[in-house]
Image (tube, rainbow, N blue to C red):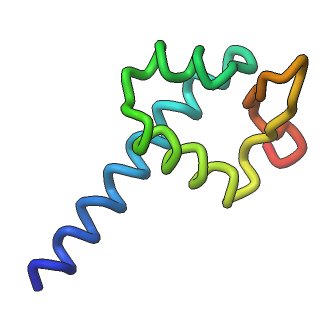
């Protein structure tokens, strides 16, 4: 039961953090550095949030001059 509660808490945290990233990306595309500075999420939490959004095809990742930028996938809105 304890493991289940931890999994649910982790899932809820990922969803909450994905929402934070999603809201930031509504205004413009951002680099990893931009997202990190504007969310105050640690590395692991930011990876999970981006992974969640990417897994749902809600964001698009594009490289530019060696920097990856994240933006809302406007095709699904």
Is 17 placed above or below 13 here?
above
Q: Measuring 60% from the left and 52% from the top, which residue is drawn there? A: 51
Residue at horizontal 73 percent and vertical 30 percent from the top: 70
The extreme left residue here reads: 2
Write down the quadrant of residue 41 in the picture: top left
Relative to residue 65, is residue 48 drawn left or right?
A: left
Quarter of the figure that contains the C terminus: top right
Residue located 76% across and 30% down the image: 71
- Residue 37 screen position, x and y as percent: 47, 14
Front-most of residues 29 and 64: 64
Q: Nearer the viewer, residue 16 or 7?
A: 7
Point out the residue furthest to the bottom here: 1
The mark total stands at 0
Picture quarter with the N terminus: bottom left
Q: Nearer the viewer, residue 33 or 18?
A: 33
Residue at 52% in and 44% down: 47
Residue that sits furthest to the front in the current view: 66
- Residue 72 higher or lower than 34, as above or below: below
Q: Residue 19: x, y in percent? A: 48, 39
Query: Which quadrant of the figure has residue 59?
Result: top right
Q: Quadrant of residue 50?
A: top right
Q: Position of residue 25 (x, y in %)?
A: 65, 25
Residue 77 located left or right of residue 32: right
Q: Is 32 displayed left or right of 41 in the figure?
A: right
From this view, report whether residue 2 is shown above or below residue 77: below
Horizontal relation, residue 41 to residue 59: left or right: left
């Amino acid at each position: 039961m304890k493991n289940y509660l931890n999994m649910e808490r982790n899932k809820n945290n990922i969803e909450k953090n994905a929402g934070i990233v999603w809201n930031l990306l509504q205004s413009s595309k951002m680099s990893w550095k931009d997202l990190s500075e504007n969310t105050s999420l640690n590395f692991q939490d930011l990876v999970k949030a981006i992974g969640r959004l990417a897994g749902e095809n809600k964001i698009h990742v594009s490289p530019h001059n060696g920097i990856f930028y994240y933006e809302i996938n406007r095709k699904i809105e």
